[in-house]
Image (tube, grey):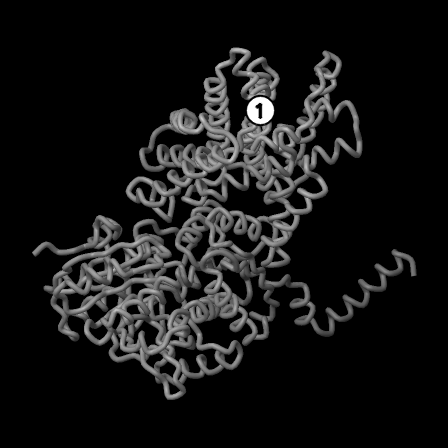
Amino acid sequence: MTTLGQATPSPPAISSGSRGRMLFVLSLLFAALAVLPLGLSRYQLGLATEMLIYGTLAMSIDILAGFAGRTSLAHGAIFGVSAYVVVYVISTLNLSPVLAIALGVSAATLLAALFALIAVRTSGVYFLLITLALGMIIWGICLRWTDVTGGENGLRGDLRVGILRDPRAFYWITLAVSGLLSLAMWRLVRSPFGLTLRGIRDSESRMRSLGYNVQAHLFVGFVVSGFFAGAAGVLYAFFNSFVSPTTVALAQSVQGLLMAITGGIGTLFGSFIGSAAILTLQNVVSSYTERWQTALGLTFILVMIFAPHGLVGLLRSVLPSQALRAGQ
Amino acid sequence: MDRRQFLKASTASLAAHGVTRPWVAAYAQAEPIRVGVLAPLTGVVAAGGREMVEGTQFYFDSISNQIAGRKVELLVEDDASNPDTALQKARKLVEQNNAHFLIGNLLANTGLAVANYVKENGTPYFIPIIAADDLTQRARIKNVIRVAGYSASAFTHPLGDYAYKKLGYKRIATISQDYSFGHEQCGGLCQVFTESGGEIVQQFWHPLNTADFSPYIGEISNLKIDALFMMENGADATRLIQQFASFGLKGQLPVISAMNSTDQSVIRTLGAECEGIVSAAHFAEGSDNPVTQKFVVDYTAKYGKIPSLFGFSMYSGSMWVSQAIEKLGGKVEDRDALITTVLGIELTNSPLGKAIKLDSYGNPIYDVAVRKVTKRPDGKLWNVPIDIYANVSQFWSYDPKTYMQQPTYSRSFQGIKKA
């Protein structure tokens, strides 16, 4: 949706000073996250791990939604396919986890390439609908191809072996992987390639007349974003040791998108804030009332009204510090 | 009174009470027994989920929320009919709320997800509703026990036998929801029916939430068959039974069904169109057994409806586990002892009105009632037993080892004997 993209304030020019500060803030944050396991209960740690995984997924969606102006509803499916491949390769084929990870990420990237071929010709609501339909196809396949996917029941296995069994170790691995992935994504959107994507978001026709191959850029953007969603899917497979059609369902894509929106579209790191906010709400509110979905819905409406640029946008408007601005 | 004084005073008074009434002090120190209840309170099967919670509460209220002098604390979490949520909530109950054991879940996929989780950490998990065959067969997990539940094909085995031998059907067709619970129930019937000598003329599989059954009913009415077997859950059951009747087939073509198709949760919304359908199950709310009748009357008085499978199963499952804890003197923390004791309990006072126990795979052995939907004098419909198969194993008459060598029932394997 181009409107979402246009609503994003254009980022300030990056001076070396602001980049230094930015890296400083990020490494502080990273260090804070790294000592988190020492103060959290096992369950809270699991929740924090989940926040990182979903944050990575939301971030991959933000690459397209925030920087290319293309809102995808297929990323849940890409994420889930990678999880399916990992669980299948390990528990059914009994192959090595390393191979499973490679195959999972490749499957997600290939799927994203296939989706991109079909979807990049469109924009706005048509892009939304095509990616929605493509995601639904994947969901249908996972539900009906019972011999391979286990149908409704999904696939299970013992994926957490050895050191992965320890929730702290698993958290640190997830933190390291999602940290690296998000740095890569951050670098990507600041690269000349990322700037081209932003140019396409702001005016496709201008970019075309400047001689850019708009579709090729969008194609690459989609595939790269799919790669990141797939990597998050691998983490998810190991986290849960379980995958079922709900993992590839539309609700998964929508949830990822809502996390990106709640954090602030086009802010990248806001995705982690969005994911933390939504998962906390889900887990806290649902213990008090079975109407927790209503509460969640109301919260989204409130966010849309009072913080249209997401929580990061809200933070920026109340404390307009350089550091936060640099977090763009 | 400063803090030091307060501490002294309270220690003294505690000690005094401890000396005079040591048993009270012992109980007061004991933490409550924390029961983690997982039920779908939102999502596609929310109606069943609410009845699950009712059944659980109904039982624990009946024992004043006390087992062996320890208070019972029910921690109810919504699994949202979604395996990912179920897993998240199971983690919360075990790791955050320190639940001593988990009980519940309705949909097989939510149960399988939680079972995979407790496999790693050893938390006892009781599944009175989850019917996936393999949880007590090929993929048995030591701490997952089907108290007061049933494996999907366990009741359709005897139904297949009854259909051929007592009802005299030779050729039948099946229509079933296309997912594993459907495949397993349908497979159980097909295997026993064809091995007895019957023929499965055709099998129809339709997606969950089919709104219009007319294409299937059209084809069914053209088949030369003696009866139709249907395996439907929830709204699909309501729709198929209604549409079958409005096509004028009711009375022309007899219907036998999986127990859940004529469960109270379905037939309490229906009228005469479901009368006469024959199914097989452990629980028949229309049984004249006085214990069953007392349960039905009390439950109806409290919740305003005849209990369904969901209410009954959670009630009986809770009773089963509670008796084991009682036997352990409340020591619910000892997981191994709890599991062994639950496996060894012979439950005598369940609403079934007869003793039940578990086989060595953690699945109950029941007297299975063949039931017929019948109208009560007050116009309400219920399932009345018309025949009994005593002591039915989940493996029917097969040797467990040989039986488990055949694949799990699926769309491609229905156990149909080739003529």
Percent of width and height locating residue B241: 31, 68
Which residue lies at the image location 38% right of the left edge and 38% below the top edge?
Answer: A138
Q: Is residue B372 left or right of residue A42?
A: left
Density class for disc 1 (Cα within 10 Å; few <14, some 14-19, many ≥20) is many
Residue at 44% across / 77% down in the picture?
Answer: B306
Judged from the image, the secondary structure of the residue bearing numbered disc 1 is helix
Residue placed farthest to the right in the image? Answer: B1
Q: Mark 1 belongs to which amino acid?
A: Arg
User: Which quarter of the figure is the C terminus of chain A placed in?
Assistant: top right
Identify which residue, B210 or B47, lies in the foreground: B210
User: In this rendering, is residue A154 above or below A108?
Assistant: below
| Chain letter, disc 1 residue | A
Residue A104 visible in rendering = no
Q: Which corner quadrant of the image does residue B127 belong to?
A: bottom left
Direction from residue B243 to residue A302 in the image, left or right: right
- Residue A273 rendering spot, x and y as whole percentages: 65, 35
- Residue A86 placement: quadrant: top left
The quarter of the picture where the N terminus of chain A appears is top right
Work out whether residue B272 or residue B202 is closer to the camera in this orientation and state it: B272
Near-viewer residue (B318 or A215): A215
Which residue is labeled 1 in the image? Answer: A201
Q: Residue A171 sits in which quadrant?
A: top right
Count the marks.
1
Spot occupied by residue B66 in the image (x, y as percentages of width and height): 58, 71
Position of residue A226 in the picture relative to residue B11 (left or right):
left
| A201 versus B53 height, above or below | above
Residue at x-position 65% and y-position 47%: A301
Left or right: A246 as drawn, with respect to B407: right
Specify the farthest residue to the bottom: B377
Asked whether residue A189 is in view, the answer is yes
Q: Residue at x 54, y 60 (%)?
A: B332
In percent of width and height, residue A49 lies at 57, 36
